[in-house]
Structures are given as structure tokens and as C-alpha cells.
Amino acid sequence: MDQSAAQPVQLLRRQMAAYDVKESEIYQDDYDTYAITFYLPRGYILAVYDSTGQLISTAEKFKNVALPHAVTAAVSERYPNWGITNDTYIVNYKDGKEAHIIYKLILQNGNKRLRVKLDEKGDFKD
């Protein structure tokens, strides 16, 4: 997973990784998958586990978390007089595949506002 993620995100991910679905009160042998949501005030992780307790996918969304340097540097370079007023960090992971990470930002310069998307490397996306 993304090691540059903000501290609260990493904390929730550790909680998700330590979760044992087989020890949960909702566990039953009849089900193939279990969807468990982990919350923080700024966001959540929806984790899907299989019947053996293996993590098979996640959907994560956090608002206004600390951004990685690559993202802030790319924004500063392309939009030098703009400030970041809002950010949303979104991650989708599926077992066996690389995580898809996107930062959705709202930039402001005076009365002008602009929405942009970047990956964790600071590359702008359409």
C-alpha cells in the first residue's frame, strides 16, 4: 500500500490489516465474502475479506489529509499562484493488482476555482 499516505490513513490501514473476520460476531461458514467498513472523522475504508479472512479488495476515501510532496510540488509547478483549498484521497485495491490512487484537489486563485486530479507520483490525470 501507499507508504506516503497521511498518518490517519496509515493508522486505519493497520486496524484493517489486523482485523480477523473469523473472530468477528458476524462470521458464518455460509458466506463467501465479508464487507467491513472502518471509519475516521475524515474518511473510511471499505474492506472486503474472503471466508478465510484474506483481504481481497478495498475502497478508501479520505478528505483533507496531508498530501505527499510529489503532489504538492506538481501543483506548485503547474499552478504557481494557486492554493489547494480542498483535497480528497481515493484508493481502490483489488487482490493481485496494484492499488489505484487518485488525489482530487480543488485549487483557488482569488475568485477562480479549478478541479484537478493527480496520482501519487504527481502526474496529472484527465
Image (cartoon, grey):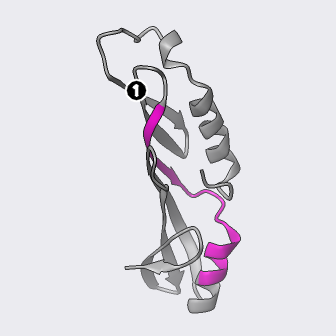
Where residue 81 sits, quadrant-wise, is: bottom right
Per the rendered image, the range of residues in magenta is: 55-74
8 in the magenta segment: no
Residue 33 is situated, as x and y percent measured from the top left of the image, at: 34, 25
* Residue 78 point in image, percent of width and height: 57, 91
- Helix, strand or loop at label 1? It is strand
Q: Nearer the viewer, residue 48 or 88?
A: 48
The residue identified by callout 1 is 50
Q: Residue 121, relative to residue 25: is it above or below?
A: below
Residue 86 at x, y = what percent? 52, 66
At horizontal 60% and vertical 39% (from top left) the residue drawn is 13
Task: Please tell me which residue is depicted at 29% across the width and 11% down the height of the picture.
Answer: 30
Q: What residue is at 44 percent from the left and 81 percent from the top?
A: 113
Q: Position of residue 117 (x, y in %)?
A: 45, 73
Drawn side of residue 84 relative to residue 21, left or right:
right
Q: Is residue 70 magenta?
A: yes
